Every structure is written in C-alpha cells, then in structure tokens.
Image (cartoon, rainbow, N blue to C red):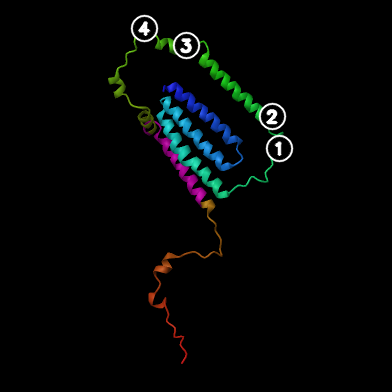
Amino acid sequence: MTSTTLFWIFSIISLLSACMVVSLSNAVYSVLFLIIVFCNTASILLLLGVEFLSFLFLIVYVGAIAVLFLFVVMMLNVKTDGVKINYSTILLLGFLISLILIFQFVTAIGTYFGPYSNIGINLISAKSPIIVSWIQENNLPSNIESIGLILYTSYSLVFILCAFILLLAMIGSIVLTMNQRSGVKKQQITLQLHRNQNRVVRFLDLRKN
C-alpha cells in the first residue's frame, strides 16, 4: 500500500469523523470522534514527514485536551433531552461556512490536478535516475533535532517566558478554584502531631454497683 493511498484513507476517515463531531447530539460520542480526527491527522502529518507535529498532536491534543474534554463532559453529565435547536437561525452561517469549505476543497483539487500537478510525475518518470547520498542524509539532523536546537538556543528566552506564563496560569486557576469559607473545619496537621496521646483515650467505668 503506497503513501498516497494511506493519505487518502486517513483524509476520508478524518472528514467523516469531523462530520460526526458536529452532527451528533451526544457530547461524549462527539469527543470520541474528535479523538479519531486527531489520530488520523497525526498519521497524515507522519506520512508528510513532519514527525514532530505528528507526535505533538498525539501527546497534546489526544493525550491532554481530548481526554480533558471527555472527563469534563462525563463529569457534568449534560442531558440533551429537553434541548431544542432552531435550525433556521444557524442556516445562513452554515451556508457561508459550507461555501468556504467547498472553495478550499476545489482550490486544493485544482492545485493537485492543475497545470503544475505533472511536475512531480515528470521528475519521477525522467530517464536520468535520482542519486541520493545516504551518507549525507544520515549525518543530517532530523526535524526534531533541528527544532530542539533552534528552540533551546535562539529562542530560549521566549521558551522560558512561555513556561513562566503557563506556570502563572496554573497557579491562578488553583487559587481561583479554592473555596475560602470561614465556617469550614480544616485539618491541622501540626495540632494533631503535638497532641498528648495520654489524654486522647479515656476509660469510663459504666458498670453499676
């Protein structure tokens, strides 16, 4: 099976799964189909040779964001029995979005089958063979190594600032979710450790003479 066939298979599955995400009324099933979209998109990026973005999709989107969506949806237990959607209000917006998607699809097909589409075929079918120096290819750094070298050398300050901003966001979310109430009894570890064990248990004689 060639890479072109795999590309079309992953693309079709991604499009069908994306349609199921926006068409299903159950939010849990929508998140599951969204995970399928992310996995197929990561496979397409891996076929295109962008392995860093492919693994980034799997780690960040599938491993963190999609699982967080699924956890929140299942925890909230959203019921859609009494929800009524007025499709007349969103008909114009859906029509405009459909036109934009159709235009992009037609443009992509025209680029693939247009006058410049036979350049790659002519290069492949040329009589002169393409010579690849595998020694140089083996010594060249991969995409992940190149991104790591640039990220930790030229853009190290920006990387540290992004990490600091994420740390502030995490601390802020923790502080905002803390419920500060005066009447709530809290556990005080220091008082429990300094408590006298001889006064903790008392023996009472309940027998009547």
Give the labeled residue for mark 2.
92
Label drawn at residue 118: 3
Q: Decide which of 92, 28 is in the foreground and name it.
A: 28
The type of residue carrying mark 2 is Leu
What residue sits 65% from the left and 30% below the top? 94
Q: Is residue 137 left or right of residue 96?
A: left
Question: Which is nearer the N-term, disc 1 or disc 2?
Answer: 1
Q: What x and y, as percent, mark residue 132?
A: 32, 16
Q: Is residue 148 left or right of residue 177?
A: left
Which residue range is magenta in the image? Answer: 152-174
Instruction: Report, in whole angstroms, how far the alpha carbon at label 4 lies from the one at label 3.
Output: 16 Å
Q: Residues within 10 Å of mark 4 (few under 14, many from 20)?
A: few
Q: Are marks 3 and 1 in contact (CB under 8 Å)?
A: no
Q: Is 69 located above or below residue 50 in the figure?
A: below
Q: Residues within 10 Å of mark 3 (few under 14, many from 20)?
A: few
Label drawn at residue 127: 4
Magenta residue check for 53: no
Instruction: Report, in whole angstroms, how far the alpha carbon at label 1 lies from the one at label 4.
Output: 62 Å
Element class at badge 1: loop
Question: Which is nearer the N-term, disc 1 or disc 4?
Answer: 1
Give the labeled residue for mark 1.
86
